Image: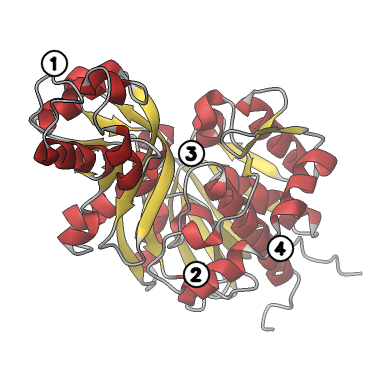
Amino acid sequence: MTESPVPLPVAVIGAGAAGLMAALHAARAGASVVLLERTSDGGRKILISGGGRCNVLPAVERPGAFVTDSSARLLRRLLGAWPLAEQRAFFESDLGLPLSLEAESAKLFPRSGKARDVRDALLDAARAAGVRPWFGAAVTDAVPTGNGWTVHLEGAPPLIACAVVLATGGLSVPATGSDGFGLKLADRLGHTVHPTYPALTPLTADPPPHAHLAGISLEVTLRAPAARPRFTTTGGFLFTHRGWSGPTVLDASHLATRARLGLAEPDSARIRVAWTRLDRDAWTAELQSGPGTVARAVGRHLPDRLVEQLLAQAGIPADRTLAQLRRGERTALVEALCDTLLPWTGDEGYKKAEVTGGGVALSEMDPHTLESRLCRGLFLCGELLDAFGPIGGHNFQWAWSTGRAAGLGAATHAQRPPHA
């Protein structure tokens, strides 16, 4: 009696958010899975996200806030393949990881407040499903061979696999192990890789005009009227010694990095700041003649050091009273309060970027399985793909959804006859 051949494994390359989800779902769908990770433990971006707390998911979906050079319709389809409510149920009911809503930021965190619990829950579930993690396994190449793939490893024999899930991330936060390997491999295999750029990264200026305001944080609205689509965001803003950070700046940063790299028109990156929720009419009324100084009137809404900066910007003496305020001065101050141009000249790059913009064209993936249309048995997911969302758990939502789809697709592929 002839024994049945041992099935070839699915090789998942990268044990980050998308890779862990892909490995887990491929194994649960019946595939033999080997999870290859160059670091000693995997999931390092999970561990550092949310200040070490891991904002697992957003409370509300925002597909329209995602950025891609591919089809926005296809992006929405991939994101919606695993609805947000089902993702939350997976973490809470399946993994036994209760989530808590942080109302002011609309983010969902593990109730424990520990990012490590998220990484460990995924890894434990993957192991329980039969996934074999190989840590410290640096992949140097993956080559299609016949009906499968040969995955070459540094200092070890190659692994023969029936399919490969590429989940190596992009270029952001290289200290976590992201080196662009997957992007280079996808390009070498003939895929269209849209130009990459740092996204969700702090902005800088040289020289920094607001260095003396470092440490001040407040809620602002940022706008980029010339961007297409028109961009606006409201939320936290932080002055730093080198420039600016905070949620609003990170969400707007791709406008600057794309323009700096020649991927967008310079005017699209003219980012304007409204320092409060008051509009021009409200500020004009606030600054009409009355008791007290202009500084005191503005200071009811803004920190004193920023008030001094804005008065200087408008050319108004610090001791000017409201009664003495000239019409032209009032107009200049209202402009400074509602429409200051953020004078960025650069950004903090990939070292502080939360995600990588650009990546492999979505049109080259099967929208159901995320199998490459160019290479049979190759599945891509996560940050490698040409899409990213705003901060607040949206990029984890993308990683979970695309990782699951790629894992299930690879498992289905593994169960087909060799020439099917």
The spot of residue 31 in percent (x, y) is: 75, 59
**How far apart are the two marked residues, 3 and 1, measured between alpha carbons?**
61 Å
The dot on residue 144 is 2
Quadrant holding the N terminus: bottom right
User: Under tag 2, what secondary structure?
Assistant: strand
Circle 4 is placed at which residue position?
Answer: 408
Amino acid of disc 4: Leu
CA distance for labels 3 and 4 = 23 Å
Most distant residue in the right direction? 1
Q: Distance between the residues labelled 1 and 4?
A: 68 Å
Local crowd size for mark 3, using a 10 Å CA cut-off: few (<14), some (14–19), many (≥20): many
Q: Where is residue 231 in the image (x, y as percent from the top left)?
A: 36, 57
Would you say the residues marked 1 and 4 are in contact, meaning their CB atoms lie under 8 Å apart?
Answer: no
Disc 2 from disc 1: Cα separation: 74 Å
Q: Comparing marks 3 and 1, which lies closer to the viewer? A: 1
According to the picture, the residue beneath numbered tag 3 turns out to be 38
**Res. 319 mark:** 1
